[in-house]
Amino acid sequence: MHPNLKVTAPATGIDLANQLAQAAAFVRRHAVASIYHAGSGHPGGALSSADLLACLYGAEMNVWPASISDPLRDRFVLSKGHAAPALYAVGAYYGFCDKKAALSLRKLNSPFQGHPHVLDLPFVESSTGSLGQGFSVAIGMALGLKLQKIPARVYTLLGDGELQEGEVWEAAMSGAHHKLDNLCVLIDYNKLQSDNSNDAIMRLEPLADKWRAFGWAVAEIDGHDIAAILETFRRAGATTGKPTVIIAHTIKGKGVPYMENIPAWHGSVKFTRAQAEEAIKALGAGDAEMKELLDV
Amino acid sequence: MSSPALIANSDSLREAFGKALSKLGDEFPSLVVLDADIAGGTGVHHFRKSHPERLIQFGIAEQNMMAAAGGLAAVGLLPVVTTFAVFCLRAIEQARLSLCYARRNAKIVASHPGLDVGPDGGSAQALEDLAAFRAIPGMTVISPADPIEMALATRAILEFDGPVYMRTGRSPCPRIFGDDHNFEIGKGRILRDGSDLTIIACGTEVARALTAADLLKEDGISARVVNMATIKPLDTNLVARCARETGAIVTAEDHNIHGGLGGAVAEALVSTVPCPVEFVGVKDVFGASGEPEELAYAFEISAPFIAAAARRVLKRKK
């Protein structure tokens, strides 16, 4: 069990799911706040991936601040690097970085760059921001851990638009070929990319069939259903001989009614104070937290 | 300083690299070699034979291979990416982000650079790689001159902490150095002393530069020859010293005249000891099919053209 989780014994599945839902809600509030302060950024895909990230850091991975340089730790690579605000927020929630400092997103001399950089923050496992590359880096990590017989697992989160990069399918081939059952790919399938829907820009379907044809174990879930995410992680961990891809159906801008399913909130977005307040309120913040997040 | 004798019919640089890597496999237990279905072409079939469990096959998919090297390095291995130089250019953005920006201890070793590729023709002859990889922050760029130096450089890059791009070569390469040769990353070396001008060369052009110096000697011109095996970081002190002591420079490389060794030397000179410079290289055009020596003549990078550049630069010397 994750040492940062304040689990009341005996922990039930419902307790854990509630805690992770709270973590995800914080991730969304903090991501909106940091993008508001930055004056630019990508809120849509940060909000759609918050539940996946909360489940990874809050329950699935054996990584916490004290284990961040342990060779046996699980690794997470944010291949969709533009969701950096969500990664920083989940890091802040679980004690990998300071909550207030992480609001300095995209500012000069801040380690919280617009896209994650491995040299800036100890819990960032790879520098990303050029789509497709994080997946390949995760392939290399999974291969390298297997070669050294280290039992750690590797997770990487890809956007759906990212799947249009040819490198993704090079990586998918290599993951199956090398039987990387220590690797789990998560796809934040919110159906929207920068300019329009996936369907309008470059069709991805039949997506699950593509991954199956490439030799992967495929799970399709509601990417906001925490119990389903945790159960799928459990099955991925029990799968041998092939890597797992979790196609997580999500809602872009999840949790903020005026953003949900609107491509314009992909990025690069400048929030007004009123928009930021409305979003953070919709995501469950009280007055005190609102002040803490916005008046820094 | 005696002039090294050229010994013909020795190994190609890629063979020398592959054999050296194979010998170093036991000494570097974390070494893994990445291949994109051209082990026989890059020389790493020697390593595959000696250390099959550490040759990782990526198929014909260089972008994934290049970025995956970053992941392998991140979990404590020492990856050496091997493919042709043109395909390194294909994956240069992966080298930029996932290797250099992330400061991974990964090496890229590129065979088949320049006109030295020969009959495969213009599409296969990377004439831009030194310039392109030199422009990436944190990247060390090396182009050894003969099989002896290649073996030493192979060890040196494995011992060096940080990303490296190193050129080998396809064609048989004359041997320049003896078994007592030393190689140090970042250090140029005077192979033959001279007083009228300095020829600064790298890779397969070093042997041609020595031949050019012989041709010039027949005309009574004393040419110094420098092997500048490290293009980045450049041995700026040596470049400045040569400019000060000989007053004129010729650069020679199997590469576009723009941005490679010539560009690096010119950058160093204008901020230290400005002097006349002539550039021998491929003149901003693509290559073509032919045998390497035919191409070297056709594209004017062979020894007589280096000598001609030396005569031109002497006319400009004050």
Image (cartoon, helix red, strand yellow):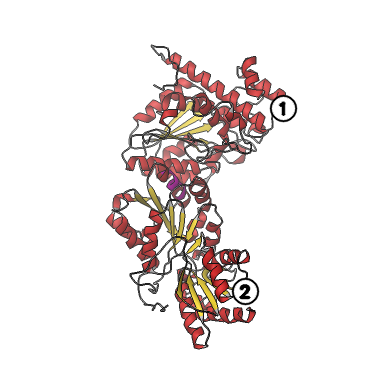
* Image spot of residue A43 (x, y percent): 62, 30
Could you confirm whether marks 2 and 1 are on the same chain?
A: no
Disc 2 versus disc 1: nearer the observer = 2
Quadrant of residue A100 within the rendered picture: top right
Residue bounds of the magenta highlight: B66-71
* Image spot of residue A248 (x, y percent): 50, 29
Residue type, mark 1 in image:
Thr
* Closest to the observer, A4 or A49: A4
Q: Residue at x 53, y 22 (%)?
A: A24
State whether the magenta stretch is mostly helix, strand or loop. helix
* Closest to the observer, B229 or A46: B229
CA gap between label 2 and label 1 equals 59 Å
The residue beneath circle 1 is: A272
Task: Report in which chain the residue with disc 2 lies.
Answer: B
Quarter that holds the N terminus of chain A: top left
* Image spot of residue B22 (x, y percent): 31, 58
| Label pair 2/1, CB-CB below 8 angstroms | no
The residue beneath circle 2 is: B276
Quadrant of residue B3 within the rendered picture: bottom left
